Amino acid sequence: MVEPIQIAVVGSGYVGLVAAVCFAEIGHSVICVDNDEGKVAALQGGNTLIHENHLPALLERYRNTRVRFTTDLGEATRACQAIFVAVGTPQSDTGDADLSYVEAVASEIARSINGYKVIIEKSTVPVYTNEWIRRVIERNGVARDSFDVVSNPEFLREGTAVEDFLHPDRIVVGTDSERASELLDAIYSPLTGGEYYQQPTAIPGCCSRLNPPILLQTSTKSAEIIKHASNAFLALKISFINAVSNLCEAADANVEQVARGIGLDSRIGPKFLRPGIGYGGSCFPKDIAAFRSVAEQMGVDFSLLSEVEKININQKKRFLSKVRSALWTLRGKRLAVLGLAFKGDTDDIRESPAIDLVSMLLAEGCTVIAYDPAAMERAEVKLPRSSQMQYANGIEEAATDADALLILTDWQEFARLDLMQLHTLMRYPIVIDGRNLYDPKQMTENGFTYLSIGRPSAAPLHEAARLGV
Ligand code: UDX
């Protein structure tokens, strides 16, 4: 293994915490800094605070050995040459990324610099942030040759973040300095050289000793744009297939067949062509808005991004209309809702289309009985319990006496429902699936009226006449 490097990671959110334990996993020594004392205490006690595959095991393995948690950024700066900044860049009222946390961290690092340091932005930031960090550090009296600022964006998906970190499609390092580049090469060498994948305890994934990831070196500004452009392009793919799904519904075609047909073209590729109720999460909505705002500030017409957003918002409204088309009136209807997280395998509800839809249904006067395997605690903060908003302990409880069942998140367990049991539990056997988890034919054979996205509605014969399908 390579010589361990002392690394500081500032911020212990999804990106920071995953990066910290993964740097430890590839042999480095990490100090993870957060200014939230409660969070630091929880992490020191082994509580990951987020639902993420492999994270509890890795935290347990390295906690208090290769990973330490602290609130003291000054101490971490003095102890480490590489300082990764992974603090939040929330969306401001204007749509821009709010960079005040990044700025505060840069100033604090500047006050503690005691030798050559490389400050590496991992948070998703607009182009030119790198230059601003450099200016802030210089303004605090630090000599230009005592530090470099690098952009090393992260492409982690929640739920598979650890695997994505250790088995990346690529590692992007944006730097204009040879010295900083050498340090980043050394940090990532266990992955790029393939040694990590030979270890018996290595987390499995798509990379291997013979097929290690590549490290792409670019200018700092290109790296910053790569991150925003990647997320914008993925969101565009989703909005594109959602628009196509609407066309399929109008033309009585099947979007799953269309997505497969276009995805087999190697220039397009099959991924991120799953139609649904729109994208959500902590990244896509925020990053599209920030990218659009950056383009505007630079006088570049990128109205394509506004269309991507518009389609995404409309997709939720269309789903609400679908529910109405199946139930006629909504007031007083009892709806079982499966899924509140913005996607499966996470407890994250930030910008979750499921949460937005439940709010819309409540506003229409429905009673919602929701179940999510991981996100209910967080959801309760946004959607407090009431006579209209209830939470169930399981699928059966949610479905009992329901006028319809709505699938809003693509959890694996929602794709394996016991259909016979469900049929007996529900008041009316109507399933409205926002994630296309079922084959319409299978649903009608089990006696369900089944509405999904971009596919012909399906109903047992007596219901088909009523719905006009
Ligand atoms: C995303 C990017 O994938 C990741 O590279 C980046 O670093 C952070 O943002 P994440 O937000 O975890 O990751 O979720 P992702 O799996 O990309 O899904 C985003 C949203 O798009 C979810 O709401 C998901 O349900 C939706 N989605 C995804 C679709 O509707 N259809 C698809 O085909 C894929």
Image (cartoon, rainbow, N blue to C red):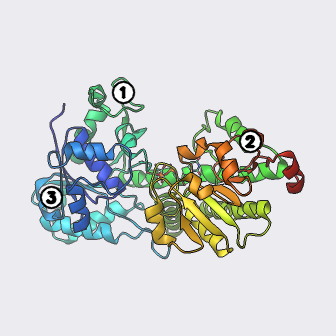
Left or right of residue 146: residue 153: right
Which label number is shown at residue 370? none
Give the structural element (helix, strand or loop) at label 2: loop
Dot 2, how many residues are within 10 Å of its Cα: few (below 14), some (14-19), or many (20+)? Answer: some
Q: Residue at x 37, y 35 (%)?
A: 214
Q: Which of the pair 104/446 is nearer the observer?
A: 446
The residue to which callout 3 is attached is: 76
Which label number is shown at residue 446? 2
The residue to which callout 1 is attached is: 208
Q: In the rendering, at what x and y percent does residue 433 appear?
A: 67, 52
Q: Does mark 1 have its CB less than 8 Å from ligand 1?
A: no
| Extreme-top residue of the structure | 210
Q: Amino acid at mark 2?
A: Asn
Distance CA(mark 1)–CA(mark 2): 44 Å
Q: In the rendering, at what x and y percent does residue 234 appear?
A: 55, 49
Q: Look at the image and tell me in which quarter the N terminus lies.
A: top left
Q: In the rendering, at what x and y percent does residue 145 appear?
A: 17, 57
356 vs 273: above or below:
below
Q: In the rendering, at what x and y percent does residue 295 appear?
A: 52, 64
Dot 3, how many residues are within 10 Å of its Cα: few (below 14), some (14-19), or many (20+)? Answer: many
Left or right of residue 385: residue 42: left
Q: Is residue 10 visible?
A: yes
Q: Which of the pair 200/116 is nearer the observer?
A: 200
